């Protein structure tokens, strides 16, 4: 089956560029986490998205991301939500359980609401609050923000393209 859409995911159309995007950022290790938000916005700006298309919401930690994502998705204002957080092994609770809970809930939200939820919620195997680790993860979150921007752009292009599909006659 051939579709009638020419979509190279590089050339944004006006409908995609006018998409409204919510960014949720957890405040644990905010100096690291916010690097993803900044690089996400910058990379999408390189595609042509304007700064006023983004709203940023802070939450205390990653566990609060899914509820915020659900509330924002249900409101009908946002075409996509990107969430960023850092879940580390603090020695008190099972960080892998927290990560799984957050990601499972984010997936449920996007399936229930139809609004894509992108995750830059990371759970490193080893994290220590040393200069070397802090620097490494700051740089890593910059890269992950750029990757999320590429995924965002492609997802919005695809979703807008679905509405334009016509079956070959």
Image (cartoon, helix red, strand yellow):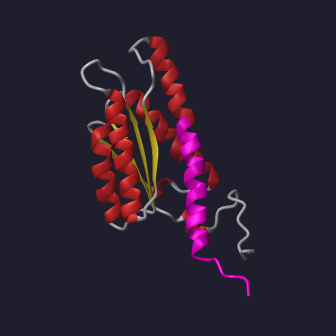
Depicted 125 relative to depicted 39: above or below: above
Depicted 167 relative to depicted 28: above or below: below
> At 65% from the left edge and 62% from the top edge, which residue is drawn?
12
Quadrant that contains the N terminus: bottom right
- Residue 76 at x, y percent in the picture: 36, 68
Residue at the bottom extreme?
Answer: 169
> At 26% from the left edge and 37% from the top edge, which residue is drawn?
60
Near-viewer residue (46 or 157): 157
The rendered magenta stretch, by its main secondary structure, is classed as helix
Does residue 56 appear anywhere in the picture? no
- Residue 4 at x, y percent in the picture: 72, 77
Near-viewer residue (48 or 61): 61
Left or right relative to 12: residue 169: right
Figure label count: 0
- In magenta, the rendered stretch is 144-169
Depicted 53 relative to depicted 136: above or below: below
- Residue 73 at x, y percent in the picture: 36, 61
Quadrant that contains the C terminus: bottom right
> At 54% from the left edge and 26% from the top edge, which residue is drawn?
139
**Which quarter of the figure has residue 130?**
top left
Check residue 152 for magenta coloring. yes
Check residue 31 for magenta coloring. no
Left or right relative to 48: residue 112: left
Left or right relative to 59: residue 5: right
**Which quarter of the figure has residue 123?**
top left
Does residue 128 appear anywhere in the picture? yes
- Residue 85 at x, y percent in the picture: 39, 36
> At 42% from the left edge and 35% from the top edge, which residue is drawn?
34
Depicted 90 relative to depicted 36: above or below: above
């Amino acid at each position: 089956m051939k579709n009638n859409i020419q979509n190279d995911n590089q050339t944004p159309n006006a409908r995609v560029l006018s998409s409204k995007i919510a960014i949720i950022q957890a405040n644990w290790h905010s100096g690291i986490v916010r690097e993803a938000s900044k690089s996400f916005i910058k990379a999408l700006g390189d595609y042509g998205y304007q700064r006023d298309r983004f709203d940023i919401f802070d939450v205390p930690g990653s566990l609060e991301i899914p509820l915020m994502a659900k509330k924002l998705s249900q409101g009908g204002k946002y075409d996509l939500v990107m969430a960023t957080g850092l879940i580390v092994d603090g020695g008190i609770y099972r960080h892998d359980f927290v990560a799984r809970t957050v990601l499972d809930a984010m997936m449920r939200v996007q399936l229930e609401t139809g609004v894509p939820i992108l995750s830059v919620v990371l759970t490193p195997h080893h994290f220590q609050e040393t200069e070397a680790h802090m620097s490494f993860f700051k740089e890593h979150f910059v890269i992950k923000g750029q990757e999320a921007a590429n995924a965002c752009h492609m997802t919005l292009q695809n979703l807008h393209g679905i509405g334009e599909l016509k079956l070959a006659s």
